[in-house]
Image: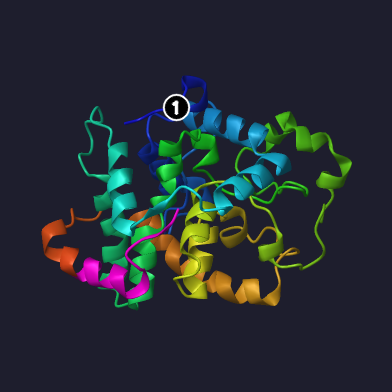
């Protein structure tokens, strides 16, 4: 697996993050039964969040949105980027030999099995393609993790909120009020969330997928909002309606990893046709 500098890679691999998130939101479990995510119990995750919360400033987010929002890294197909993501396989991991594309198929096949429309299935397949940010050289704290608004007060529903004390924005009075730089119920499209793979894949695919899919992609890591009800004072009525789709997507994102290994050869024709239905042969990345 390609890595970044050690001090920017507190998790051994991206799958360690996925395991942690799934453990926090076990279906049918009481809050007290979730895995303990205190710093001493999960030092790798705690270190990840220490960096994430210290470095995800408003200035950083605006810089990354401008950099990647230009979609200036060339034209490639969805399949090119899925193959590129496959280089993130960790050969030293004794617990799994699944490629990244097989992980994508696990999510999309679970959605397909439940009879959802093709665009929903496709959303499951592409939702993690934004993790190619790691291969662009971005540190993990700028790729994965729960997302949250910057430029306003931090919710106590964000995991490890105490780590925000090291963020320079925590010293900016304007940024630490309830609404910060935003207006009441201004709508999430006007709110800047911490940078990561969600926003990137949304930027890349937004012109090709229906709006519910766009919300699923853009906000699937916004756990403080769609799991805990935080930041509703920034959401408008349309956001509230669309978040029903985000919540519908969430279980497939969290719980499909342990599913049977997909028969890629058997299902590939279906996905070739599905991708071609929504995307041209190449898109801007």
Q: Is residue 68 visible?
A: yes
Please check the rendered image and state whether residue 86 is part of the magenta-colored stretch, yes or no.
no
Q: Which residues are drawn in magenta? A: 270-285
The residue lying at 72 percent from left, 29 percent from top is 166
Which sits in the foreground, 192 or 153? 192
* Image quadrant containing the N terminus: top left
Please check the rendered image and state whether residue 274 is part of the magenta-colored stretch, yes or no.
yes
* Spot occupied by residue 145 in the image (x, y as percentages of width and height): 52, 43
* Spot occupied by residue 154 in the image (x, y as percentages of width and height): 73, 46
Identify the residue at the far top of this view: 6
The residue lying at 31 percent from left, 55 percent from top is 104
Identify the residue at the far right of this view: 173
Q: Is residue 37 visible?
A: no
* Spot occupied by residue 142 in the image (x, y as percentages of width and height): 54, 39
Quickly name the residue at label 1.
4
* Label 1 residue SS: loop
- In this rendering, is residue 33 above or below 55? below
Q: Is residue 154 left or right of residue 22?
A: right
């Amino acid at each position: 697996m390609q890595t970044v500098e050690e001090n920017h890679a507190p998790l051994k691999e991206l799958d360690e993050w996925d395991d942690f998130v799934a453990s926090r939101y076990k279906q049918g479990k009481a809050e007290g039964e979730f895995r303990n995510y205190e710093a001493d119990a999960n030092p790798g995750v705690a270190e990840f969040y220490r960096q994430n919360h210290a470095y995800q400033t408003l200035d950083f987010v605006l810089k990354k949105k401008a950099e990647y929002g230009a979609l200036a890294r060339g034209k490639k197909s969805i399949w090119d980027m899925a193959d590129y993501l496959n280089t993130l396989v960790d050969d030293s991991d004794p617990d799994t030999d699944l490629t990244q594309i097989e992980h994508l198929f696990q999510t999309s096949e679970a959605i397909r099995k439940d009879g959802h429309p093709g665009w929903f299935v496709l959303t499951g397949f592409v939702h993690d393609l934004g993790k190619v940010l790691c291969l662009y050289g971005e540190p993990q704290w700028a790729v994965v993790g729960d997302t949250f608004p910057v430029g306003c007060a931090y919710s106590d529903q964000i995991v490890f909120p105490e780590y925000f004390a090291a963020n320079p924005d925590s010293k900016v009075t304007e940024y630490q009020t309830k609404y910060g730089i935003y207006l009441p119920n201004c709508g999430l499209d006007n709110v800047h969330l911490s940078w990561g793979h969600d926003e990137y894949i949304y930027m890349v695919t937004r012109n090709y997928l229906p709006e519910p899919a766009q919300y699923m992609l853009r906000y699937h890591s916004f756990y403080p909002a769609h799991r805990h009800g935080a930041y509703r004072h920034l959401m408008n009525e349309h956001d509230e309606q669309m978040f029903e789709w985000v919540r519908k997507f969430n279980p497939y994102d969290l719980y499909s990893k342990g599913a049977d290994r997909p028969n890629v050869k058997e299902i590939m024709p279906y996905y070739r046709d599905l991708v071609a239905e929504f995307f041209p042969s190449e898109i801007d990345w």
